[in-house]
Image: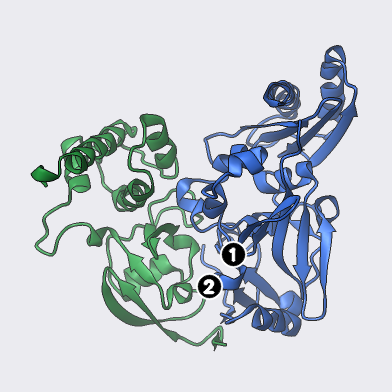
Chain colours: A blue, B green
Amino acid sequence: MKPSAFEYIRPGSLAEALDCLKRHGEDARIIAGGLSLVPEMNFRLVQPKVLVDIADLKELDTVRLDADHIEVGATATQARLLAWPDLAKVSPLLALALPHVGHFQTRSRGTVCGSIANSDPSSELPLCLATLGGSVILRSKAASREVAAADFQLGLLQTARKPDELVVAVRFPIRQKGAGYSFHEMARRKGDLAICAVAAKVTERAVRLGVGGIADKPTVRDWNDLADSGLDDKLNELAWDLEASDDIHGTAVYRRQLVRRLGRRAILEARECRN
Amino acid sequence: MPQLNSDGRRSVSFILNGKPVTAYAEPRMLLTDFLRQELGLTEIRVGCEHGVCGACTIRMDGLPARACLTFAVQADGHRIDTVASLADPEGTLNDLQLAFRRHHALQCGYCTPGILMSVTAFLEVNHNPNEEEVRDMLSGHLCRCTGYVGMVHAVLDVVKSRQKKVGSPASV
């Protein structure tokens, strides 16, 4: 359980980091907290030839409130975002979801952008980004582009990031006036990856539910003018659409039931929270 | 821009428990192995090697970190603290360590150094946690002996006694 050999580069600036990625392309992996990448390396699921360590790049350690979104830089940790003043007011969903991300001891080094870039289907932050309709800022030496969450996460550990690009920031839309939010998940133990996680956003006429942990990426559904009597049918349809499978953590039957129950709980709770 | 070949060993320097140290590591060497094998620190415990069990938890620049998910070369230029930083130079245990002993918060002791580092960092950001918060923090560690009850009692005991100290400056 030791990683295979690699070259280690610690760039001194964002520009140097982008140079490295241009030079080494697919041979390189970016490391910040390493909370997702190093287990994969220790198991030799990934064997990068070059590791580009951006953890010390202070210029990317930012959490910034803009007109309609919170922008989190590449090296800002999950703990930093969780401790950010007014998070619960500005983004109730993130405030509810972040305590489920790993543990106190891992949020201190695990980065927000790292979770998004790793795109584990059971991970909470990609689910929040997808449900809120956020975006990812990618930069290469040549160009910068903004990609919507739905177009960024392509599948299990797969994203639209090109080999010479760095996820420099992610943008979470801030609380929408008149909307209520809720987050729930089921895991074997608190802090483990979710067997099923749900994020809900409810406005006067619209219900949006994101589900993680079952399909190979977060799945988001929108329902308009949904009557209470129709809720269970919609959740049942969604539960079957996700094509859950059996694994060591739970059966497909159990997972479908989690979608129905947690989905219902989150939607009703989000409705309560509206103001 | 520092660059290190995969087969070359490179000098790694950091502040360990307040004192500067330098040793050599190839890039793929985990910080756990570096601290144990190159520096001989037996208080570093290697458990799962994928960040789940928490036995190897240290403090890096004051923040809790899984040493098994950190490469030694990443520690270069940083500050690393292990459980050996808690007792005073004569070896007298600090209030947290004494509380762990008083409440039987350990049995085999394998997980204890990591847990003590977590608790130390946790109490610096949360001076008055309740039981639920303490249990939530401890959920980042696996202990197969104690059932955690003694640990919860020990941490809450320390919280109470530290508050008393703060509350009555005359007694400090």
- Of the two numbered discs 2 and 1 on the same chain, state the one appearing first in sequence: 2
Residue B62 visible (yes or no)? yes
Q: Image check: A225 left or right of A23?
A: right
Q: Nearer the viewer, residue A7 or B144?
A: A7
Q: Image check: A229 left or right of A271?
A: right
Instruction: Determine the chain carrying the residue at label 1.
Output: A
Q: Amino acid at mark 2?
A: Asp
Residue at x 69% of width, y 21% of height: A272
> Is the Cβ of the residue at disc 2 closer than 8 Å to that at disc 1?
yes
Query: Which structural element holds mark 2?
Result: loop
Residue at x 68% of width, y 35% of height: A197
Residue A238 versus residue A14 in the image, above or below: above
Residue marked by disc 1: A75
Quadrant location of residue A116? bottom right
Q: Residue furthest right?
A: A224
Q: Image check: B146 left or right of A66?
A: left
Residue A129 versus residue B103 in the image, above or below: below
Q: Nearer the viewer, residue A159 or A169?
A: A169
- Quadrant of the frame with the C terminus of chain A: top right
Q: Amino acid at mark 1?
A: Thr
Residue at x 51% of width, y 66% of height: A2
Q: Position of residue A191 (x, y in %)?
A: 53, 41
Residue marked by disc 2: A56
Q: Quick one: label 1, few (<14), some, or many (20+) residues within 10 Å?
A: many
Q: Are marks 2 and 1 on the same chain?
A: yes
Quadrant location of residue A254? top right
Q: Position of residue A149 (x, y in %)?
A: 80, 52
Residue B1 versus residue A272 in the image, above or below: below
Q: Position of residue A219 (x, y in %)?
A: 81, 40
Query: Which structural element holds mark 1?
Result: loop
